[in-house]
Image (tube, helix red, strand yellow):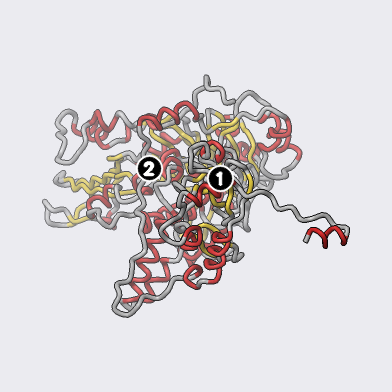
Amino acid sequence: MSSNSAADGTRPLRLPPPCSHLAAYRSCGGAAGGGGLRSLHRCLRRRPPLGRPEVRRETGEVPRCASCRGGGPRLYACLACAAVSCLHHAPDHASAPGHEIAVDVDRAELFCAACRDQVYDHDFDAAVVIALTTPAASRPQPPQPGSRAKRPRRVEYRPWAPDAPERAVIGRRSSPLIVREGNASSSSTTTTANSTAAAAAAATSCATSSAPLPWGLRGLSNLGNTCFMNSVLQALLHTPLLRNYFLSDRHNRMVCQQKSRKKAYSKERSNARDATVGLQFCLACDLDAMYSAVFSGDRKPYSPAKFLYSWWRYASNLANYQQHDAHEFFICMLDGIHEKEQDPCKRPSHVSSGECCIAHRVFSGTLRSDVTCTMCGFTSTTYDPCVDISLDLDSKQDPTKVTGSKLHTNGGEANSMFASQTCGTSTLMECLERFTRPEKLGADQKLFCQHCQVRQESLKQMSIRKIPLVTCFHIKRFEHSSMRKMSRKVDQYLHFPFSLDLAPYLSSSILRARYGNRVFASSGDDSDTSIESISNLELFAVVTHSGKLDAGHYLTYLRLNSQWYRCDDAWITCVSESAVRASQAYMLFYVQKILYYKASENVVVS
């Protein structure tokens, strides 16, 4: 061969010397007991999309380096102990005798970690060919008749709870959900869409101030008259208890989908095909995905199209591009979450007490209704669960004088303030006082008295027995009269405090004012001290409505880190407290002060 190569004028082919570590591995009986390296075909498989060989692994298993826990582009599994190492830590693992030879996890190639080079072995090459040509490597074989089929491995979902060392690591390496943006280019992302020059100037001035931007503040795209949905979603996304629930993976989408498939399969076997229609979507899963997207750090406007489609499927009568009521959407959304999140093991008493799902645990409260007979004084008491409290504005003012005028053509805050001066003012405390004031029922509303055994005129008085963790006050700005066949909007200014004390409107306070010290707590009632200790509330979100009844617009004001932000669909701008007070409040969200989270001003985020 050397003479022919010399005659042809070409240099002879020089093969690299064989790897001494591979030879030592083979001489020591590596992969013995099953035909040497050829037996490794049982550990290989064909990758479904590309057909390339790789190391067999469990479904959903992600290989990582045992030293740095990284998932780099090249990972190697040791043939002696099956330890996975990256290219940087593979030589350290090869320092132990007999651990030099490894196999590439994603390419099924032999690699010598000591030489830091790929090596070739005829038997291993034959194992790769067997793995690629054997049908069992690409698809499972059907079980033989009479043999017991092997059940697939199931991994039960378990919530993660950190131990003491992990809590120490979290304490050293975690920071509050705020971010400080120092340069001008990043500060311009405060406004999450291309707004007008005024909005951009306000956003830039807010971003360049010393106050850090809250994490999770992201605009929502308007999908066609969906400002009612965006305004409520912004308030729910920043509700402290809901935020903590979904961000801590308390509602796992994969587990929920598995449960839905099992229910659909069981109902399909029982020929209940109509019952499987509502199991193909989940508002809680879509809300969980929205939390992940909003708190991902991306400042671009988020499109809630998937959530809108699921809500349309849940409320088919509202599946259109018309403007809907934000309060109606809020109630419908909580009902949808309740249907998916409720625990079937809970007793009916837990459902009425608000312990059945996350929506009721956060927003559910209890109202007390006392109906007293005017003849004998007999009082009938009922308790009704509620997720919000609807309040009437002062009916003495006549807002029809300005209805249809041009006060809200621009939808600005100054127009709203001018409308409030024209239509009169009211306070939230006055609305609550009217809500808890005794009301005399008319002659056409006589109720049956159990003591008199006849229908008598009576007095009705409402009070708050249980304060929810998050209280939603719904201001009745839309009036509909079936007698006059007309609808109107009440353009009246409402003064609301940022800190509210509900103690005067609790059942214990009202009963004490009615009967004095002759009040005894009934069975199941909480003590006055336990109820009044949670009566202090803090305002964190305001949903407003500007414009006319048939052509209006919803937006939300959020209070984050002691700063107010105006969320107008995709536009996010900083505003002052006076701008929030001058708005036409439609829904007010208060959280108990003991649960209100205030970021520390001494924390500096690097």
Q: Residue at x 51, y 71 (%)?
A: 134
Q: Residues within 10 Å of mark 1 (few under 14, many from 20)?
A: some
Who comes first in sequence, dot 1 or dot 2? Answer: 1
Residue topped by disc 1 = 21
Disc 1 versus disc 2: nearer the observer: 1
Q: Is residue 562 visible?
A: yes
Indicate which disc residue 35 carries: none
Quarter of the view holding residue 597 = top left
Q: Residue at x 61, y 36 (%)?
A: 417
Quarter of the view holding residue 162 = top left
Q: Amino acid at mark 1?
A: His
The one of 50 and 80 positioned closer to us in this rendering: 80
How far across and down, in percent of the image, does residue 23 sit? 55, 49
The residue sitting at the front extreme is: 3
Residue topped by disc 2 = 160
Q: Tell me the element at label 1.
A: helix
Q: Residue at x 28, y 56 (%)?
A: 445
Q: Residues within 10 Å of mark 2 (few under 14, many from 20)?
A: few
Residue 6, placed above or below residue 316:
above
Residue 314, placed above or below residue 414:
below
Q: Quadrant of the C terminus?
A: top right
Q: Amino acid at mark 2?
A: Trp
Residue 273, placed above or below residue 595:
below
260 horizontally vs 602: left or right:
left
The one of 57 and 370 positioned closer to us in this rendering: 57
As measured in the structure, the alpha-carbon distance from the residue carrying label 1 to the one carrying label 2 is 43 Å
Q: How many marks?
A: 2
Residue 173, placed above or below residue 552:
above
Q: Tell me the element at label 2.
A: loop
Q: Is residue 422 visible?
A: no
